[in-house]
Amino acid sequence: MKKMIVSYSLTGNNEDLAASLAAALGVDHVRITESKSRTMLTTALDMFFNRTPKISMPLETIETYDWVFFVGPVWMGQIATPFRACFKQAKQKIGDYAFISISGGADGPNLKLADELEKKLGKEPVALIDLHIADLLPPEPKPTRDDTSAYRLTENDVKHLTDTIVATLDKTVVH
Ligand SMILES: Cc1cc2nc3c(=O)[nH]c(=O)nc-3n(C[C@H](O)[C@H](O)[C@H](O)COP(=O)(O)O)c2cc1C
């Protein structure tokens, strides 16, 4: 089975996780990048006007992979907007896929991700793993959005999250 990771990260958490997963699984890793620098306003406008931001991504060979693992953040309950153009390109071309995220989780689970993936990629993910920074922080006082958004994963966090994800994928992904 040929597998690849396609990742996007704004502040580094999902980049560190994706790189660690690529090493642990021994799979190719392709990154989505944006030529324009992103601000909170850019993100708010993407959401408000349902924009598909321009990205660059070497994805020509995606159809030669049996499995794609998308790794990236959740913004305002949705998959980070730089994935939109990627999903448009990947729809009809990909086989099985999973979506994996280390998101903030201060407001609880991100309940709309499965619907969004099915809508944008035309089929359900085999695995949807949304892990939360809030679970890495002390439970009291309850982590706020500011706490989770400011948090950067440590090496230990990345290792622990990678082990958790690999164990989950072992149960769902055909080898
Ligand atoms: C604009 C914005 C919106 C966010 N919205 C959510 C959200 O709805 N749910 C969530 O769990 N985390 C949310 N987060 C937290 C990020 O998902 C989290 O900080 C993530 O680890 C950042 O990933 P990155 O470092 O790879 O960019 C948001 C962060 C930003 C900047």
Image (cartoon, helix red, strand yellow):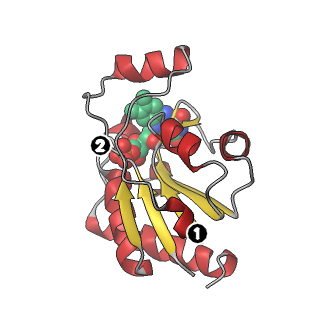
Sequence-first tag of 2 and 1 = 2
The residue tagged 2 is 11
Q: Secondary structure at mark 2?
A: loop
Type of residue at label 2?
A: Thr
> Are there few (<14), some (14-19), or many (20+) residues within 10 Å of tag 1?
many
Q: Quick one: label 2, few (<14), some, or many (20+) residues within 10 Å?
A: few
Q: Is residue 59 above or below residue 172?
A: above
- The amino acid pointed to by label 1 is Trp
Return the residue nearer the eye: 147 or 118.
118
Instruction: Report if residue 150 is visible in the image.
Output: yes
Judge from the rendering whether residue 118 lies leftward or rightward of residue 86; answer left or right. right
Picture coordinates of residue 130, whole percent (x, y): 57, 54
Residue 52 percent location from the top left of the image: 49, 27
Q: Does the residue tagged 2 have its C-beta within 8 Å of any atom of ligand 1? A: yes
Q: Foreground mark, 2 or 1?
A: 1
Residue 10, located in which quarter of the rendered image?
top left
